[in-house]
Amino acid sequence: MVSLSKAREEPVKQLWEEIDGVHAGMLGLSGTDMHMQPMAPFADPQANTIWFYVKKDSDLMQKLRPGARAHFCVIGKDHDYHACLSGTLTERKSKDKIDEYWSSVVDAWFEGGKQDPTLTMIALHIDDCEFWASTGNPLRFGWEIAKANLKDEAPDVGVHSKLSFA
């Protein structure tokens, strides 16, 4: 369950923890007609970057251009945290990053393993993010809905904030 106090007091730390906690999010190139697609994120908080393994011959790589902007959307595993991150997406085939994040799951996608000729990596350098953290407590949720209906005001069921990494 997401911590609303952490969302208020340590939103950046919570964001990276949520990214680490999901198997996949949705990645999409801005300004293209491509739909977003599920991708497994590998968080590098010190560099404000999310790394992804990708095949060079994929549709995503065919559309990727220098200076491309992209969005990555994350839904926390308990469905009480939602974030949309944006930044610059670049191909950065880094042997160090390939080794750092490699696993049997990644290996299953690349027939030739780390030497697969189609293997490359892309890095989303995060500029900004908007997130929503909501209470998972059904009693609190019910109370806030009832109170809002009585007072004719919006219920207070979570935290919404914008973060800048630039």
Image (tube, grey):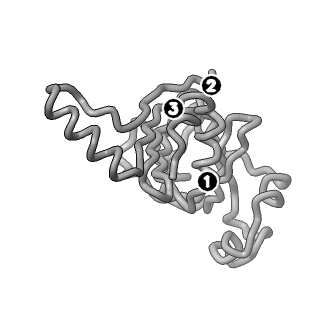
x 61%, y 53%: residue: 41
Looking at the picture, which amino acid does disc 2 mark?
Answer: Phe
**Between 13 and 6, the one nearer to me in the picture:** 6
> Which residue does the numbered mark 2 point to in the structure image?
165
Closer to the N terminus: mark 2 or mark 1?
1
Task: Indicate which disc residue 41 carries.
Answer: 1
Looking at the picture, which amino acid does disc 3 mark?
Answer: Cys
Q: Label 3, label 1: how many angstroms apart (C-alpha)?
A: 15 Å
Marks 2/1 in contact by CB < 8 Å: the verdict is: no
Residue 70: give x, y in percent of width and height. 50, 39
Residue 44 vertical position relative to residue 116 in the rendered view, above or below: above
Residue 33 vertical position relative to residue 152 in the rendered view, above or below: below
Quadrant the C terminus occupies: top right
Closer to the N terminus: mark 3 or mark 1?
1
Residue 89: give x, y in percent of width and height. 59, 39
Residue 117: give x, y in percent of width and height. 72, 67
**Between 46 and 110, the one nearer to me in the picture:** 46
**Between 28 and 115, the one nearer to me in the picture:** 28
Residue 145 appears in which quarter of the rendering?
A: top left
Look at the numbered disc 2 and give the secondary structure of its residue: loop
Residue 108 appears in which quarter of the rendering?
A: bottom right
Marks 2/3 in contact by CB < 8 Å: the verdict is: yes
Closer to the N terminus: mark 2 or mark 3?
3
Q: Label 2, label 3: how many angstroms apart (C-alpha)?
A: 8 Å
Looking at the picture, which amino acid does disc 1 mark?
Answer: Pro
Q: Label 2, label 1: how many angstroms apart (C-alpha)?
A: 18 Å
Look at the numbered disc 1 and give the secondary structure of its residue: loop
> Which residue does the numbered mark 3 point to in the structure image?
129
Residue 35: give x, y in percent of width and height. 37, 52
